[in-house]
Image (cartoon, helix red, strand yellow):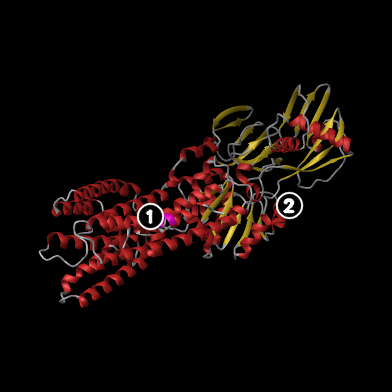
Amino acid sequence: MSSSAQGAAQAAALSVPAKTYSYRFFLSVCFLVTVVYSLSLRSAPSAIFVLVLLNLLFCADVMFKNAWRDLENFRITLSVLSSICVLAGFCYGLSKTFFLSPLAGGVPDLYIALSAGVVLYLWTCSRAARSKERTKVFIKKLDDFLPKSGRLMQGQREMMVFARELKKGDIIRVKPGERIPCEGEIAKGSSAVDESLITGNMLPTAKIQGSRVYAGTLNKRAEIMVRVSKGLDESVIAGIIAAIKSSERRRVLRKDPLDAYALWMLLLCSLLALAGYIYFYWVGDYRRPLHTVGVFLLVLGLGCPLSFFFCTVFPSWCIHIGARRRKIILQEQGALEALAQADAVFFDKTGTLTYGELRIASVQAQDAKTKRELLITLATVEQLVDGPFAAAINIYAEEHHIPARKLLCFDVLPGLGVKATSGKNTLLAGRPEWLREQGVEVPQITFGEQPVVCGAKNGKYLGYVLLDDKLRPGAAEMVQALKDMGKKVILMSGDNEASVTAVAQEAGIEDFNFGVLPQTKAEILSNFHALGKKAVMVGDGFNDITALLRADAGVVFSSGKNVYNNWVDVIIRRSDLDSITDLFSIDRRLSGCIRVNVFLSALYNVVLTAWLLFAPPPDYTAWFWVPVGLLAGVGVIFLNSARLLNIK
């Protein structure tokens, strides 16, 4: 969306930088404090008028400009409502201060009300502007994902060069444990490569001569020669980082929720002001059209009560606290509305629908005694190893109280297995083909795509364990709940066809894509938007970030320590998928609370205005009751919003 189109689509207040509001806000607070202090000391009305005039000229100018721009685009927003009410209150105070025959009205002036209205308007717009600008933080951390150097081969000579200097056709050497510095294909050798940063697949992928490899992925097993096909700047990982740095958010533009109610508040206060004018004109001792205009200005000046500015602020604070108690971090409140309006919810697989961690699914051995010996062997070998296979075995051993023997030494062969010595025993744990290479007779068993770890002791085969990445609790129920709401559920993952198909069938998802790269995920969402539909993306990893930014709202399952969390809308720190349906419940409660707040704000203001007109306080206390009444309305809104602190 072009910048001009964005300007036409959003309220003028959101196009102004946060700093423009910030310094005006602090200056306006100073003016407000000075006005309150002057009124309490009964200073000259003309001096107070000058303070209010300076507040409008130097602080409220941005409010008037925003209102004018919105009116030019035929929009009634908070800026328009606030400007009309502030100007009406100013004209009312002007008549009370300088007219020899002041206009009708029950209070001396509305200086405190309009000054406080300017302060709260600037504060509200400053919060919205800061929220919009938040995605520009932590940019420098992203470069840590890029490889820094590579081993360029020139004949038999090897030379270390910067990764960005590599060009198409170069041959590079990549040793085990090193990151591949560019995209290309294997020219010589074979290995296992960890591509989790790109595809999200936690298991290393087998690579042979001619296989494609990606920049930033980790070579796990053996030395390989790679022929460069794309430089680092053209790689998939560089494209992901460039998308984040340029903040390419293909989002429905957020709007201030108060803008949706501004038109109705303006219509209500205008009708009440007109009704008050007509009533006091006809029941007056004598009919003076100009004199009764004071009633119209008084009602209109109070038409945007202070409590109206807090109708969304208090619920937002309370819902954030309530959601945090349920381990849900709402970084962008507008994401809840986008989630409710979405036509489809896209899910990543690994770490989102599944835990993203391998667990032992079954243990296969000849008998119970051999099974026990197999588990002890695997627990002993893997106790000091770092990796998904070792983690699964260690967790299983801890849960089932499997003892791990003391190790004398061990040797890890990435992508193959582990060889260890414990006492007088030689222990092996790894792939079946690797155990065969070590002279162990391993039966010919077809495991399919399911990861497996075989064990052997002193050259004797003991059995194997099958590992699996299990669905999170409530996955099938969550998918069905989304379908019942009329949402389309789509799974897209970088994993292989077999694993994606199995998860989709178990979760009850009919539409799924496998082998999908990060840029392709973003293109799928763009195509969905081109059909005029809205989408939400639920993911967990760096490889999902372009899709998360391209969706109308992004939701991640995370520990909260990932750099990409700064660009997503909702962070979930729970293991169950009930949290997704909880978001819909939170949105319903939040929307309902805001509607009630707006109603209470309008009702309370009508009562206050009617009391000021029909039972005006004595002149010596009249100035005091307007701010007290408005602050009491704020208290009512806070009490209603506090219900959101407890979300069940």
Q: Nearer the viewer, mark 1 or mark 2?
A: 1
Left or right: 436 as drawn, with respect to 539: right
User: Are discs 1 and 2 less than 8 Å apart at CB?
Assistant: no
Residue for badge 2: 498
Work out whether residue 352 or residue 88 is closer to the camera in this orientation and state it: 88
Res 534 visible:
no
Residue 407, percent across and down? 76, 24
Specify whether 568 is left or right of 278. right
Q: Amino acid at mark 2?
A: Ala
Asked where in the image residue 385 lies, by quadrant, the reply is: top right
Residue 334 position (above or below residue 269) = above
Identity, as a three-letter code, of the amino acid under mark 1: Gly
In percent of width and height, residue 93 lies at 19, 60
Secondary element at image label 2: helix
Q: Residue at x 15, y 74 (%)?
A: 288
Image location of residue 74, percent across then percent down: 33, 67
Q: Quadrant of the C terminus?
A: bottom right
What span is in magenta? 634-639
**Residue 635 - label:** 1
Q: Is residue 627 left or right of residue 477?
A: left
Residue 247 screen position, x and y as percent: 46, 48
| Within-10-Å neighbours for mark 1: few <14, some 14–19, many 20+ | some
Residue situated furthest bottom in the rendering: 282
Mark 1 element type: helix
